[in-house]
Amino acid sequence: MTITFIVLAISALLFVTGRIRADLVAICAALALVLSGTLTPDEALAGFSNPIVIMMAGLFIVGAGIFSTGLAGMVGSRLVSLAGRSETRLFVLIMLATSLVGAFVSNTGTVALMLPIVVSMSRAAGIQSSRLLMPLAFAGSMGGMLTLIGTPPNLIVRDAYTGAGHAASELGFFSFTPVGIVCIIVGIVCLLPLSKRFLTKKEGRQDQANTGYKSPEQLVAEYRLDVQLAVLRVGEGSPVIGRTVKQLNVHGRFGVNVMELRRKRRTGLLLSPKIEQYSALGDVAFAEGDILYVSGAEEDVVRMTQELQLHLEPQQGTPGELHFYDVGMAEILLLPSTTLAGKTIREVDFRNSFGVNVIGIRRYERYLLTDIDRISLRQSDIILACGAWKDIARLERGGESEWVVMGSPTEAARRVTHDYKAPLAALIMAVMVVVMAVDSIPVAPVTAVTLAAVAMVASGCVRGMAEAYRAINWESIVLFATMLPMSTALQKTGASDVISHSLVSVFGNGPYALMIAVYLATSLLTFFISNTVTAVLMAPIALTAAQAQGLSPLPFLMAVTVAASMCFASPFSTPPNALVMSAGGYRPIDYVKVGLPLQIIMGIVMVVVLPLLFPFS
């Protein structure tokens, strides 16, 4: 027991100081317990097979699907429009929406689903995501107090209550609702000032809005490509069918740049059409119904349309109509040491050398978009290239001392949203939520999350397993999995019993004193072990202590479930706290600064409110 307390104290100290990575501290704590003989290797590694840990990994992948299809941005934009320009209104809206979902879905699932949405909302509103993500995690826990199924401690105390011979109807599905409403009100009132005071990070720590990166959409707007953008359709009987852009020599004959060829196919899933994009310089032959996005002078586009018997869409293209699923754009800066100065674009021949089209040149404040092939290049010119993402990425390796590709094409390709798959991502998410929320469906939550994660990858909402692995925040996974054995050590050595019984025996004289002792003991244990395990340990103690004094056990059991669920001062006491740790750029001390005052205020309020809602006698 002594060794367990020492390891626990050292770990807590290192977590608070933040000088060593939290996941490394957790690993060292688990190793110390194994080397001291407190835990076996199997017990120390059991956390990695815990369903909650597997769920966390799967939910990261589901969140990636919500992000990469643009679904998060769509929902976030709608909520931002409701909130207007008020940060306070946005904060309250997030808290209420998360709490409402958390009443019927596990707090882990709720926070994982809301996390990408909130990040998108913060970007759209120009607010640091760190100001919103920790309140998001706390709101998920608060919402769990609204219903019986909202959080595991609620079910645990109900089982303890009915096991003592009381009627199950006395603690029904919505018996927790008044307590949950109080928790949400207290949480909003307290977190508004606390988040502004302690969760504002230095610029650039986790939000990278000002990194100099330009999205393809920004490049289209900057170069005003929409002015010369036209959308052409290949109709029935067109002579271009079966031939490629290269074979037709479109640029040489008409002086028009084909930016992309787009083809839509229907799949077996009606909600998920397959949209294929091809670079103009590829070997793909035109087919009926293909859409071409071209840039050039109006008279050249009209001549091309007439000679090749294409259909000019009545509405001119706009930047919003351009998508960059497989075809992208990037700026190339010519270095002072370049040997290309004095050569024309035609002489450099980017098309055959790298498979990309040059569709614009920026020279100081001028944007050159016409007769590009005849323009002689100069040092420090910025060339706008368009082509397949993989071909643009080749430019990074092929320039050497000639040029540098601005931004990161690989990262830009990863940021592109496959918005046409958003309905499918929404369907997968909705099915997962329903399966997790409805008890009559015989599928375990961890199974539902795993199936949803696999569906996101298989449907292309997440672009392959490599992207899925990148989406998982391994620091959070390792931190949570390696701290779970600490609860095993506390139970195995009897340390948890010593803590809880000592507090109750010292402070448990009189109903209010006993309630304070029960609440304090439960809150203290949540610093070191999961809230579910804490509720399992404390429920029988509270029940027995109340009965010994001739009091109704109901208010004391409610004190256990509230104290166990409202555990805010530690990043590993609940999965939601761990889920937002990396995304918000938080350190363990941040949870202490924000979560501890909230936990104390919540405890004071609950000691007053619970006896009013659930009398002692």
Image (cartoon, grey):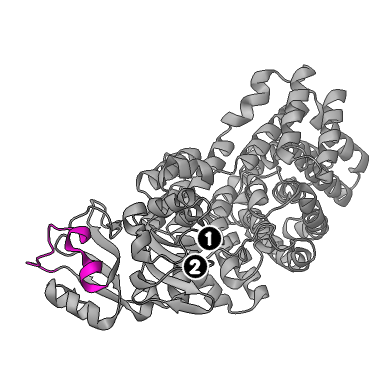
Q: In this view, does 346 lie to the left or right of 363?
A: left
Question: Residue 232 at x, y = what percent?
Answer: 22, 72
Q: Which type of secondary structure does the marked residue at label 2 adopt?
A: strand
Q: How crowded is mark 2: few (under 14 residues within 10 Å), some or many (20 or more)?
A: many
Compared to residue 292, the image places residue 317 above or below, namely: below
Where's the N terminus, which quadrant?
Answer: top right
Frontmost residue, 17 versus 532:
17
Residue bounds of the magenta highlight: 235-255
Q: Mark 1 sits on what residue? A: 406
The residue depicted at 65 percent of the width and 49 percent of the height is 582
For the point 79% across and 23% down, the residue is: 493
Q: Mark 2 or 1 closer to N-term?
A: 2
Left or right: 359 with respect to 538? left
| Horizontal side, residue 615 vs residue 170: left or right | right
Residue 198 on image: x %, y %: 79, 61
Vertical position of residue 516 compared to residue 26: above or below: below
607 within the magenta span: no
60 or 429, nearer to the observer: 60
**Percent of width and height locating residue 442:** 42, 39
Closer to us: 75 or 360: 360
Mark drawn on residue 382: 2
Question: Local crowd at mark 1 within 10 Å, few (<14), some, or many (≥20)?
Answer: some
Can you name the residue that lies furthest to the left here? Answer: 237
Q: Quadrant of residue 26?
A: top right
Examine the rendering and report whether any part of residue 119 can be seen.
Answer: yes
Asked whether disc 2 touches disc 1, contact meaning CB atoms under 8 Å apart, the reply is: yes
Which residue shows up at 66% across the image and 46% down it? 578
Which numbered tag is attached to residue 417? none
Which residue type carries mark 1? Met
